[in-house]
Amino acid sequence: MTNQMNSGNERVDLAYRRRKNAEEMRHQVIAFVLMILLTLIAFAAVGYEEFSHWFVIPFILLLAGVQVAFQLYYFMHMSHKGHEFPALFIYGGVLVMLVLVWAFSTIVWW
Amino acid sequence: MSTIARKKGVGAVLWDYLTTVDHKKIAHLYLISGGIFFLLGGLEALFIRIQLAKPNNDFLVGGLYNEVLTMHGTTMIFLAAMPLVFAFMNAVVPLQIGARDVAFPFLNALGFWLFFFGGVFLNCSWFLGGAPDAGWTSYASLALDSKAHHGVDFYTLGLQISGLGTLIGGINFLVTIINMRAPGMTFMRMPMFTWATFVTSALILFAFPPLTVGLIFLMMDRLFGGNFFNPAAGGNTIIWEHLFWVFGHPEVYILVLPAFGIFSEIFATFSRKRLFGYSSMVFATVLIAFLGFMVWAHHMFTVGMGPIANAIFSVATMTIAVPTGIKIFNWLFTMWGGSIKFTTPMHYAVAFIPSFVMGGVTGVMLAAAAADYQYHDSYFVVAHFHYVIVGGVVFALLAGTHYWWPKMFGRMLNETLGKITFWLFFIGFHLTFFIQHFLGLMGMPRRVFTFLPGQGLETGNFISTVGAFFMAAATVVLLINIVISVKGEKAPADAWGDGRTLEWAIASPPPVYNFAQLPLVRGLDPLWLEKMEGKKELTPAEPLGDIHMPNSSFLPFIMSFGLFVAAFGFTYHQETAWGLPVGILGLLITFGSMFLRSVIDDHGFHIHKEEVLELEKKGANA
């Protein structure tokens, strides 16, 4: 939609934007490598017979949470400016769902 | 494509409406179809009251009564109140925030047609064996047992389709309000109705998915051999109740928050005063929405959740009275010291306060879990939710109809007839439902098709039936008013002379592009602000230029029609050979048209500056 810059000139601050893009690319590659690593760890945790389920399940859920954060913040640009509303609605939805689950698991059924 | 207005034939007008993506025409569509479903639901209500007019009546017996009462509730909530709310959101919100349309005009049309075909599908059940008969809540234990005909399948699939439309509409308004406000229109300068729409849309976004999940489970159980709600096979019938009410309670606020928004506009306009406590109104609206998610189990106190759950949900429910109370006092203080003009919408607004407060008070009574064991499933509950929904939502919809009719259609509704409608409806409403509190306390159960003589219930029920006919008469007067308004007085831009918000700054009805130049908003109630400084119109925020518009499209209609066909196929797929192929054909139609939408480039068109100037000149003369 509308360009946020004051000037319509595409070449304004080209050097700055190149540096910025390169930096972002680096972050994405690092996040990507980490995500693959986390996936491998998850597979290993499930595959290793010695670990009990009581350890493995919370552990891979935790890894999944980290993956979601990487996905949102590094690949879907939620760390950038102008993503306050998506963040508000994601956290709002998570809050409502957590309260629901919490209510079910504490007062409704147990 | 030319935008110069000219006389069109019936076919051309019809085609125009079938393909329109203009928020103002979609508002007309919502208003007309919601209105028709409202009449249908009203007719069903009359049948219920005729059956209960005297003891041992046999006008509607047993199963048929169950069908009528189920369809009355379902129709009124999903097919009348919701679309009528959407009608006003569509007609007004883009104008109030100074936008040329909603963010996704195509999706807006899709949302309407999905709702429409879902509603038509649901009502087809009347002609195909029988309507749903498990109550509007369709509790799984009843719904899975309703095996005589396909009624409940029409409920699940029909609501699934129209629910999809509502979800699309809600998301559309969220994006519109976040992204398309005119320059200067900060969040805390948005009119109260826009705020209500924003919060309501967020509620829709979070509340409809549980309903969707519940309906899918029910569909699986009934049509595809699932066992989600079947305890004999390891399912749990209570899950439906939870899913339904996790949706169902926010749904109440989805209906009533826009109603609050409509009344906030009306109170400020006709008290000719700024809305009292604007920021606390916004706060209260958001708080009601948030708390609305924490109280669903108060519909299930007698299910046996135990004293701890009942106590917590009981207290949580009572806290909602606090933000609602804030709102009530703000409205009263808006009127206090104002120069009040008693127009028809203002009549509804003033009558709304005591009527709705009565519904609220019985609400707090019902929230007391221990007492609820007495009220549960009696006419006391029926009286309570009709006070809230009729005294709150329907009053607001009627008020909104009178208030925004000139903006939507360019003609004033007759004030005398409007006041007659109001008095008939107001008296009829209290006559019908006030007495039902006492019928309930005397022990009359809801959803039962008859009662016996000699139990002291005759007089109360007869009075209630008389009241229902008053409301019917009011509706007839409103229809007459609408018909004669075609030749009625032409409405100027500021139709009531006291408009405060942006919609009253442009012609009635607005030109297709709404604002020739987007306005600069300098404060809350921007039009009032400019008028107080002696100006006739708003300061433009941009030079006059070509205006980009979206193209009309027939695809939303076809996409929705595909789901309509598919729903028929899947309903009958178990006992007929044609069911499955028809179901698949329907889905192919839907996905095929989605594919077309993806591959065909549609860049819209421009209305050129010269055309805009010409149209503006015409609008000024008219």
Image: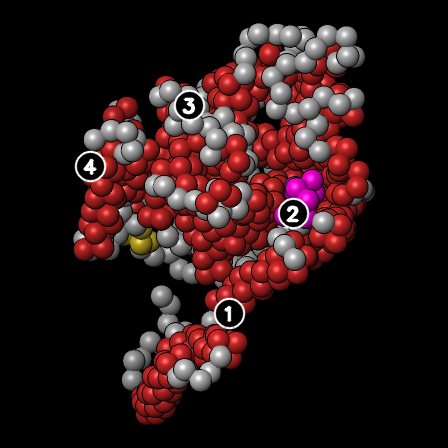
- Look at the numbered disc 2 and give the secondary structure of its residue: helix
- Label 1 is placed on what type of residue? Ala
Chain bearing tag 3 is: B
Chain bearing tag 2 is: B
- Label 2 is placed on what type of residue? Ala
Name the residue carrying label 3.
B148
Of circles 3 and 2, the one toward us is 3
Indicate which disc, 4 or 2, sits on the residue closer to the N terminus. Answer: 2
Which residue: 38% across, 20% down? B129
- Look at the numbered disc 1 and give the secondary structure of its residue: helix
- Look at the numbered disc 3 and give the secondary structure of its residue: loop
Q: Which residues are magenta?
A: B296-305
Query: Label 3 to label 2, Cα distance in Å?
Result: 31 Å
Q: Is residue B506 left or right of residue B370?
A: left
Asked whether the beta carbons under mark 3 and mark 1 sit within 8 Å of each other, the answer is: no
Residues beneath discs 4 and 1 located on the same chain: no
In this view of the protein, which residue sits in the foreground, B91 or B136?
Answer: B136
What label sits on residue B297 in the rendered view? 2
Q: Residue B467: percent from the left, percent from the top?
A: 68, 16
- Label 4 is placed on what type of residue? Pro
Of circles 1 and 2, the one toward us is 2
Answer whether residue B513 is magenta in the image.
no
Name the residue carrying label 1.
A87
Quarter of the figure that contains the N terminus of chain B? top left
Name the residue carrying label 4.
B581
What label sits on residue B44 in the rendered view? none
Residues beneath discs 3 and 1 located on the same chain: no
Q: Look at the picture and state if B311 lies above or below B429.
A: below
Query: Label 4 to label 3, Cα distance in Å?
Result: 24 Å
